[in-house]
Image: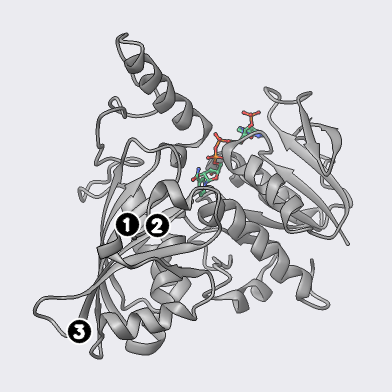
Amino acid sequence: MKNVAVVGASGAVGERMIRLLEEREFPLASIKFLASERSAGKTVTFRGEKHTVRKLEKGEFEGVDIVLSSTPGGVSLEWSPIAAAAGAVVVDNSSAFRMDPTVPLVVPEVNPQDVAKNRGIIANPNCSTIQMVVALKPLHDAFKVKRVVVSTYQSASGAGQKGIDEYEAQARAFGRGEPVPSPAKFAHPIFNNCLPHIDDFLPNGYTKEEIKMVNETRKILGDDSIDVVPTCVRVPVSYSHSESILVETESPVSADAARALWAKAPGVTVVDDPTAKRYPLAASAEGRDDVFVGRIRNDLKNPNALLFWCVSDNLRKGAATNAVQIAEVLLKLEPARA
Ligand SMILES: NC(=O)c1ccc[n+]([C@@H]2O[C@H](COP(=O)([O-])OP(=O)(O)OC[C@H]3O[C@@H](n4cnc5c(N)ncnc54)[C@H](OP(=O)(O)O)[C@@H]3O)[C@@H](O)[C@H]2O)c1
């Protein structure tokens, strides 16, 4: 039984973490919910009981064993080390610690063994990376992945509650025949649009989101030789990210062999019957925990390449589910600091 704190409890990811702790019957001695002073005093219902959201402050981590944190990077940078110093293990959803060589970056279907290396902080990867590496892992084990060309179709909720609110307000205004409200969270209106722009641009022309996919994939799969070629796009969808992926492998790969591997891979569901109009869809993945793969097909020329479509709920497997799964791995570690 663990004493748990959910930090960022009022956010899009925090809300899902709370539901997942309920659904997965996480063994709890106590639980508390923290956020900024904006949400302090609001109420959260957990396992039928009402809890008050508290302001994140020093002293809140006394006696806490596990912290599930989903705050902006700057807040995590300041507070996750404070929680770790107080004796907790922090599962941090932000990008603040992901590439820190002393911090494990974990997807439980891929590298659960890295959880044991934690020194008080474990990083949860970026949502678009998590779903891709869950699908790549069985291919990497069987055929060795050399190069991945990925284009993402990322939902508005990837930008948090404000992203969801902005997209839905624009869609509602359009439905009423009113002018679409000006963008604030996104650079352009997300309604009726596709934005090839997620996070800031870097001098090399890529965005930070794209470079996260490059670096995090290598770290999680433990192979710096993998080439990742990403283009990240925000699309007018509320929940779930979709990805078109071309993977090149060292040994020959085939759609049939990949389908067979994915059929028994943890966390993967194959939805691949195009003649019956069955393939992974963002709307069907919403609220689910799996990574869905379909449109699995051989490259027309290259026997060492495969194409597929990959969809997952970014707030669940892309964030909250992955974090709670990491906490479940922590529970099994004896006598590690969990
Ligand atoms: N959305 C996704 O798909 C996704 C996926 C993977 C990782 N992540 C990462 O997870 C983190 C949270 O994302 P989100 O989408 O849940 O964002 P969000 O909906 O904007 O929620 C942010 C949360 O952080 C809290 N917070 C902000 N400033 C704070 C402060 N100074 N002190 C304490 N709490 C503070 C907010 O509390 P208030 O309500 O009080 O402001 C809110 O609970 C980010 O680092 C994001 O990059 C998101």
Q: Position of residue 2 (x, y in %)?
A: 85, 59
Query: If you read the primary sequence from the N terminus, does the residue marked by circle 1 or circle 2 appear first?
Result: 1
Query: Label 1's element?
Result: strand
Query: If you read the primary sequence from the N terminus, does the residue marked by circle 3 or circle 2 appear first?
Result: 3
Residue on which the image places disc 3 = 304
Extreme residue toward the left, this view: 301
**Mark 1 surroundings: few (<14), some (14-19) or many (≥20) residues within 10 A:** many
Q: Quadrant of the N terminus?
A: bottom right
**Mark 3 surroundings: few (<14), some (14-19) or many (≥20) residues within 10 A:** some
Q: Is residue 285 left or right of residue 329?
A: left
Q: Residue at x 39, y 42 (%)?
A: 155
Q: Quadrant of the C terminus?
A: bottom right
Query: Label 3's element?
Result: loop
Residue 202 appears in the picture as rendered: yes
Callout 2, which amino acid? Val
**Mark 2 surroundings: few (<14), some (14-19) or many (≥20) residues within 10 A:** many
Residue on which the image places disc 1 = 243
Residue on which the image places disc 2 = 311
Distance CA(mark 1)–CA(mark 2)? 6 Å
